């Protein structure tokens, strides 16, 4: 899938991504975008070991034969980025000095509910009302200063 971000002819996109110390990765809708962000988070190599087993009367027996190979994997898989829920994110923090990079899954807290204002005093009236906004409240028995 081609997006304006991927088709940026200015070449700023790699500079922006590579020159930030913190990346907050949210849910990605397309596989291509999810894979691109997973590549930005990095890859590592691990040894994959396979052992050969034989089926017998007493269950599976180890034949002693094994094979190994190196496998590259993403620190954050594209599939994980595609299934993040609302409010979920993966945060990547660049290594500083001798520290290692940090990659953590976080949940962004929703904003607190707005404070409920007390019911208006029926003895008060708005001083000025502009486009539905009431500015300055005065009591009916008080007169605004001239």
Image (cartoon, grey):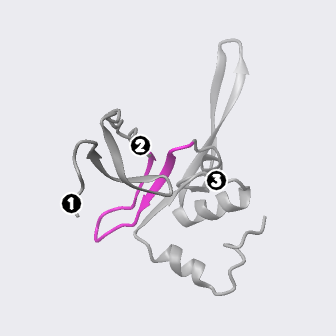
> Magenta stretch?
86-107
Q: Residue at x 44, y 42 (%)?
A: 110
Q: Residue at x 66, y 21 (%)?
A: 60
Near mark 1 (Cα within 10 A), the count class, few <14, some 14-19 or many ≥20, is: few
Q: Secondary structure at mark 2?
A: loop
Q: Residue at x 41, y 43 (%)?
A: 109
Whether residue 125 sits left or right of residue 61 in the image: it is left
Q: Residue at x 63, y 43 (%)?
A: 83
Residue that label 1 marks: 145
Do residues under tags 1 and 2 come within 8 Å of each other at their CB atoms?
A: no
Q: For the residues carrying marks 2 and 3, which lies nearer the camera in this image?
A: 2
Q: Mark 2 and mark 3: span between their CA atoms? A: 24 Å
Judge by depth and name the residue closer to the eye, 76 or 68. 76
Q: Is residue 103 visible?
A: yes
Residue that label 2 marks: 109
- Which residue is outermost to the bottom? 10
């Amino acid at each position: 899938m081609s997006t304006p971000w991927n088709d940026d002819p200015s070449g700023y996109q790699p500079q922006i991504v590579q020159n930030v110390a913190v990346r907050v990765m949210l849910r990605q809708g397309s596989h291509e975008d999810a894979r691109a962000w997973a590549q930005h988070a990095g890859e590592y190599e691990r040894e994959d070991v396979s052992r050969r087993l034989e089926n017998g009367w007493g269950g599976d027996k180890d034949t002693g034969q094994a094979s190994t190979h190196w496998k590259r994997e993403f620190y954050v898989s594209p599939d994980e980025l595609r299934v993040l829920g609302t409010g979920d994110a993966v945060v990547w923090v660049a290594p500083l000095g001798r520290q290692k990079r940090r990659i953590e899954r976080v949940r962004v807290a929703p904003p607190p509910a707005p404070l409920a204002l007390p019911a208006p005093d029926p003895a008060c009236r708005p001083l000025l009302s502009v486009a539905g906004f009431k500015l300055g409240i005065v009591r009916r028995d008080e007169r605004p200063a001239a």
